Amino acid sequence: MFKEFKRKFIGDKDFYKYILLLALPMIAQNAITSFVSFLDNIMVGKIGTEQMSGVAIVNQLMFVFNICIFGGVSGAGIFGTQFYGKGDHEGQKYTFRFKIYISLIISAIAMLLFHFAGTKLINLYLSDSGDVGDIELALNFGEEYLAIMMIGLIPFAITQAYISSIRETGHTLVPMLAGIAAMLTNLVLDIILIFGVGEIPALGVEGAAIATVVARFVEFGIVIIWTHTHSNKNKYIIGAYRSPEIPGGILKDILLTGTPLMVNEMLWASGMAVIAQCYAVRGLEVVAAQNISSTITNLFNVVYIQLGSCIAIVVGQHLGAGRIQKAKDVARKMIFFSVVCCMLVAAVMVFVGGFFPDIYETEESIKALARTFITISAFAMPVCAFCHCCYFTLRSGGKTIITFLFDSVYTWALVIPFATFLAKYTGLGIALVFLLVQCMEIIKAIIGFFMVRSGIWLQNIVEKEV
């Protein structure tokens, strides 16, 4: 029995060596990116509750933008990965062009939205319920932070288009190194600009925003320069800007397959923002506690997030090369590996969560609530990891309509109404509300299990020449 279990769910040394060589740089790069926000959060949290809350709300809006960019490039990335597995560099070039176009379009829409409706969006998260903090002050700090952060939207978006294509070729080290450079830049500038050094005045929230924007430009420069100076490793970049052309067949396929994915990511991210807003109606105390909790949670979540991305790359390459049964076997083993890893990560997170809130200069009630949120999130992590892996497995075969139903429709049809009802129309404590909403992932995991087991995602979407 154990031999059968091992055959189905546990790979050999070469399997784990390959997965770790692919995943560790991606995990490190994403962790570094999260660490940049982590640094801003902690340092701004040293200033006060209102500053921390204002920045947290804007970062929630930025999270929606970031996920929209991810969704935009991922739609083309499904094809890019399979084109690379097939050895079709021209096809990968066309998907790269699409990523650049969609990144610029999303950035332009976001900049217009933040410019004309930024204050209204921030206000959605501010409630005078509770006894902690000044909501007007939090709004002012949020507006200051958002105005500067908008400058970094385009470089961030273009960077993601490049990083997505680089990862499709299996080169995950360079994005990691670029992320390290960005993190160090952000750290140094945070210390100088937030608190002031010598003749440089303390800029507080504005200093944190400036540091983040400069760090994004640093990452942008490194990734682009490396890609264009190593065209032998990135063959899709040769002639990528000589023409704006994307053949009609490829464009049609990307739009048909990728649009549901892009819409899904947008709806899912906005759904997470709506759920956060549901909690926020309980007062600024909850906003601050949730911010502390999400800061550490996002840092630990990079493990299962990037292992899911590895599934998209590895399984997508096997599908593109026509190795259907191999893709199925690899997906099963990678899902198991991800869940086991996240059990270990969750244990560490519970331990760290016990003292992490003490770093912040805020009220004890906020710290206590943050600890509770962190513990609940840690226990939910293995289930979230399984759902995430199911999502990427289904997506690797181009089943974007199914992933749309599985991800964003589930969130909007079930999770959001449930969270809204509990937070706004019951007298349950916010910790219990948070726990019950997290438990909704169990239902999603059951659905994901049967969908992956069915094998409906096992298809080659670049088999025909286009």
Image (cartoon, rainbow, N blue to C red):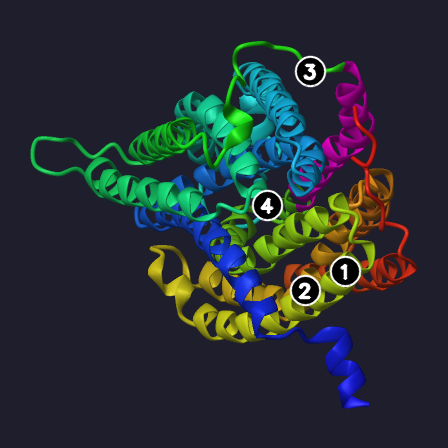
Q: CA distance from mark 2 to mark 3?
A: 34 Å
Query: Secondary structure beneath disc 4?
Result: loop
Q: CA distance from mark 1 to mark 3?
A: 31 Å
Q: Position of residue 380 (x, y in %)?
A: 67, 66
For the point 36% across and 45% down, the residue is 177
Q: Which residue is mark 3?
A: 246
Front residue of 172 and 46: 172
For the point 62% across and 67% down, the residue is 376
For the N terminus, the quadrant is bottom right
Q: Which residue is mark 1?
A: 326
Q: Between tags 1 and 3, which lies in front?
A: 1
- Residue 364, numbered circle: none
Q: Magenta stretch?
A: 248-275
Front residue of 254 and 432: 254
Q: Amino acid at mark 3?
A: Ile
Query: What is the chief secondary structure element of the magenta stretch?
Result: helix
Q: Residues within 10 Å of mark 2 (few under 14, many from 20)?
A: many
The mark that comes first in sequence, 1 or 3, is 3
Q: Which residue is mark 4?
A: 129
The mark that comes first in sequence, 1 or 2, is 1
For the point 19% across and 39% down, the residue is 192
Q: Which residue is mark 2?
A: 334
Q: Between tags 1 and 4, which lies in front?
A: 1
Q: Position of residue 102 (x, y in %)?
A: 63, 21
Q: Amino acid at mark 2?
A: Met
Q: Amino acid at mark 1?
A: Lys
Whether residue 375 is visible, yes or no, is: no
Q: Is residue 109 magenta?
A: no
The mark that comes first in sequence, 2 or 3, is 3
Query: Secondary structure beneath disc 1?
Result: helix
The mark that comes first in sequence, 1 or 4, is 4
